[in-house]
Image (spheres, rainbow, N blue to C red):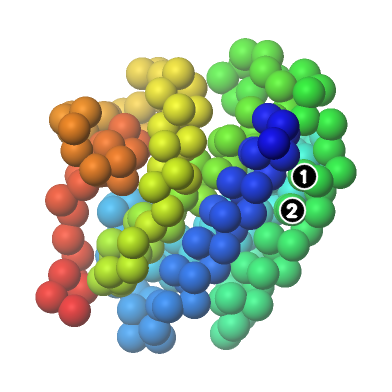
Amino acid sequence: MSGAAEAIDLLERAVRQSAQVIGAIGVDAHHLPTPCPEWDVQALVRHVIGQDLRNFAAAACGGTPDWLAPPRALGPDWVAQFDAGAAEVLANWRAADLDREVVMPSGAAASLGSRVDQQIAELTVHSWDLARATGQRAELDPALAERSLAWARPMLRPQFRGPDMAFGDEVPVPETAPVYDRLAGWFGRDPQWAGESAGG
């Protein structure tokens, strides 16, 4: 399998995992806190559907993502909304030239394929966030976490961390810890975080 084909395959797996996690969220969990302090479950799903999918769909077509534009309100069927956005994203990525050079948010030049890895990481981390927030016990795909870490370790630099930044400070986690614990820690989450659903 080529590098581009492998990236798209993993993105499809990240999409399926996200859909499964979102589909398992009950109405009574919509306002539970998440490991992202600024978002409850509903707000985080709104971010995933209305910002992540929209912006990566634009990036795949060579457009400029607008992360400051607010996401649209969610309808009652979150899975249907997610599936519609994900279908557009996957179609755009399958048609894209992943070797084309683009400028990343850091200002560094990289292949467009790096944005596929960025989206894999975004979906994978937020799947962990939502699963943890809603007490879901299903095992998450370790290959997605490994791929996400491989992308994020060189990309998530200290200048992107701290108060008023997109990411919190790294939470130290042993290299022998489970891969999702290491991923959560690298993205500034406490792997031991437990919200209101911890006993559920």
**Residue in view at x 72 percent, y 69 percent:** 84
x and y percentages locating residue 112 in the rendered image: 73, 28
Image coords of residue 56 (percent x, y): 69, 45
- In the drawing, does residue 90 fall left or right of residue 168? right
Dot 2 amino acid type: Leu
Q: Secondary structure at mark 2?
A: helix
Residue under pointer 2: 90
Query: Residue 166, can we see it?
Result: no
Pick the front one: 156 or 21: 21
Residue occupying the point 50% across, 28% down: 151
162 lies left or right of 98 = left
Circle 1 sits on which residue?
93
The amino acid pointed to by label 1 is: Trp
Residue 25, given in percent of the width and then of the height, sits at 41, 77
Of 113 and 46, the residue lying toward us: 113
Mark 2 Cα-neighbour bin, 10 Å: few <14, some 14–19, many ≥20: many
Give the left or right position of residue 28, taking residue 86 as reference: left
Q: Is residue 130 above or below residue 79?
A: above
Q: How many marks?
A: 2
Q: Is residue 130 above or below residue 73?
A: above
